[in-house]
Amino acid sequence: MVKRTGLKRQETKIFFPGHVFLLNLHGTARNGENFVDGRRISFSSRHPGSVVFVPAGIDWTGWDEGDETASFLLVSIEQEFAEEMFGEAVRHRQTVLPPSIGFRDGLVEMALQRIAIELKQPDPLSAAMVEGQAKQLLVQMVRLNGAYHESLKGGLSSFDLKRTMEMMGSLSGENLTLAALAKELGVSRFHFCRAFKQSTGKTPHAFIAERRLEKSSGMLRSTSLSATEIALECGFGSSSHFTNAFRQAFGVSPMEFRRRCRI
């Protein structure tokens, strides 16, 4: 856990023999420069919830300016851990995991948030929980970057998948139904569900739930809205539904999550 206060500008230099995840817990970096192995890459603002992934042996340097107060979670995963987890195949395909500076992914963010919670209030089972979340992080990064992906027949076309993502982002509540999404694409609900899972590896319900939880965690960090107000804003049927889903994903209630993020 890294916290800083009183500095609008910070310089960054990260080089680890293992894979590194850096989760922005508090504060926004609004402008700066990024260099990966000496090569300049584009800079985009990093808000709370954004993630930096630096693969093993890659050098990330740069600087950024933003809020004076900020906090981060840095997780380093040894290469040996990844090799034992994936077996021999991963040794020959490590380079398929490129660095990614300032991306958003609900599953990655939730896994890192669970690790942060375990660090703040550890117990005898924390090590096992953190190890499980580390495995989930590696699996998701492999999937996000298309490693070991084999094309599947019957999935959505890239155009229809993009349209679906856009609709999921614009529709909410009772308007966001599988029937409505399938109708927009001109296919049956059954075909849509099957094709969506083949394209993304997730069911539509799981994907939508993940996005709602991602949005709600950001609102808990950045607003003073009540749990009920956030539940309605994020498309949950009730505050109890929101609380149960959030606790299952993050291991704590929404209000406890907010409290820990502001410690």
Image (cartoon, helix red, strand yellow):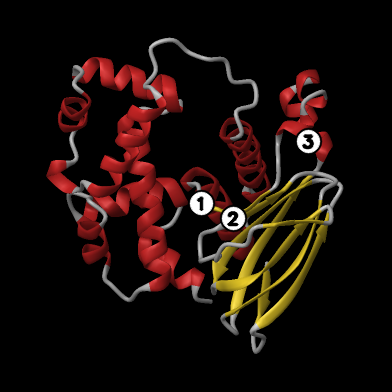
In the picture provided, is 210 more to the left or to the right than 81? left
At horizontal 18% and vertical 21% (from top left) the residue drawn is 186
Residue 92 sits above or below residue 78 on the image: above
Q: Amino acid at mark 3?
A: Phe
Residue 245 sits above or below residue 120 on the image: above
Q: Position of residue 96 (x, y in %)?
A: 72, 31
At horizontal 34% and vertical 39% (from top left) the residue drawn is 165
Residue at the disc numbered 3: 81
In the picture provided, is 22 more to the left or to the right than 256? right
Query: Disc 3 vs disc 1: Cβ atoms closer than 8 Å?
Result: no
Residue 193 sits above or below residue 60 on the image: above
Question: Can you see residue 253?
Answer: no
Q: Amino acid at mark 2?
A: Val
Q: Nearer the viewer, residue 246 or 58?
A: 58
Real-space Cα separation, disc 3 to disc 2, in angstroms: 21 Å
Residue 166 sits above or below residue 47 on the image: above
Give the quarter of the image for residue 30.
bottom right
Q: Residue furthest left?
A: 174
Query: Disc 2 vs disc 1: Cβ atoms closer than 8 Å?
Result: yes
Q: Position of residue 42 (x, y in %)?
A: 64, 58
Q: Position of residue 128 (x, y in %)?
A: 65, 42
Q: Residue furthest bottom?
A: 6
